[in-house]
Every structure is written in C-alpha cells, then in structure tokens.
Amino acid sequence: MPDYLDKVKRYAGVFGTGLLRQMAPDIAGGMLNELFHTWNVDVDKVCRDVQDDRPIWDDLKPDQRKHLFDAARSIGNLNFLTVEVVVNGIKKDFPAVAGLFLSWPEAHDWLTRQLDILKREVLSSTE
C-alpha cells in the first residue's frame, strides 16, 4: 500500500485535491486489491465472513489503518468508497469474489456495512 499512498501525496502536491478526488476510486481500488491479496481472499473466505458477519476493520494492521487515515486526510473524505469501487478494484484478480458481491444480496449488504464501519472509524480518527 505505501506505493499508492506515495502516488496520492505526489498527485495532491502537483494537481491539488480536485484531481485527487477524481482519482480516489482508482487508487482505492488498487489498495483494496492489494489487501485482498494479503488476506488471501477467496469465495469460501467471503462466504464465511458474510455468514459470521466478521468485520474487515479487525483485519487491518496498524500501518494499513494509518494509510487509510492519511488518504482520507489528503482527499477530504471517503464518500467515494462504495461496493462498486471495491468490485471494480478486485474484479480482474478476484472475479468470483467480485461476482459474489454483485449477485449475493447478503454479501453486498455485508460489504456495504463493512465500508460504512471503515469510513466511520477513519472519520472518527481524522476529526
């Protein structure tokens, strides 16, 4: 993830926050794709996590949380972070998981809740 954060900082300095906000979904998609690789996500893991209502926030290491805080501070908010951004970020490397989030309502709802929790946690830490 540090590679993406470096890009965020570089673009913020050169182009300002307007362009950065436009690029945020693509940057976030790349970050999420990396996280999915780190967590070895597959369909079985997602099914278990959805059924157990397991929070993603607990899987984030302190340095990963810091990157999210820094990105939110640079961009101004995380409102762009949606299920669609996650799906677009992972669909190439994790097509079955992306399809699961789109076709299984419980998985879609679970991911929506997880993103809401993530946004709330980051917002509470950046205020």
Image (tube, rainbow, N blue to C red):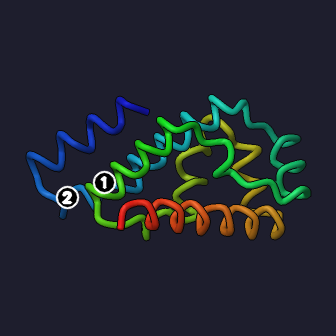
At horizontal 43% and vertical 60% (from top left) the residue drawn is 125
Q: Secondary structure at mark 1?
A: helix
Check the image and report above or below for 50 versus 44. Answer: below
Name the residue that disc number 1 marks.
23
Name the residue that disc number 2 marks.
19
Q: Position of residue 90 (x, y in %)?
A: 59, 44
Say how many tags the image has. 2
Q: Secondary structure at mark 2?
A: helix
Q: In the picture, which quadrant includes the N terminus?
A: top left
Amino acid on which the number 2 mark rests in the picture: Leu
Q: Position of residue 59 (x, y in %)?
A: 67, 42
Amino acid on which the number 1 mark rests in the picture: Met
Q: Nearer the viewer, residue 90 or 118?
A: 118
Question: Mark 2–mark 1 contact, CB under 8 Å?
Answer: yes
At horizontal 48% and vertical 47% (from top left) the residue drawn is 29
Mark 2 Cα shell of 10 Å, populated few (<14), some (14-19), many (≥20): few
Dot label at residue 58: none
Mark 1 Cα shell of 10 Å, populated few (<14), some (14-19), many (≥20): some
Q: Nearer the viewer, residue 92 or 120?
A: 120
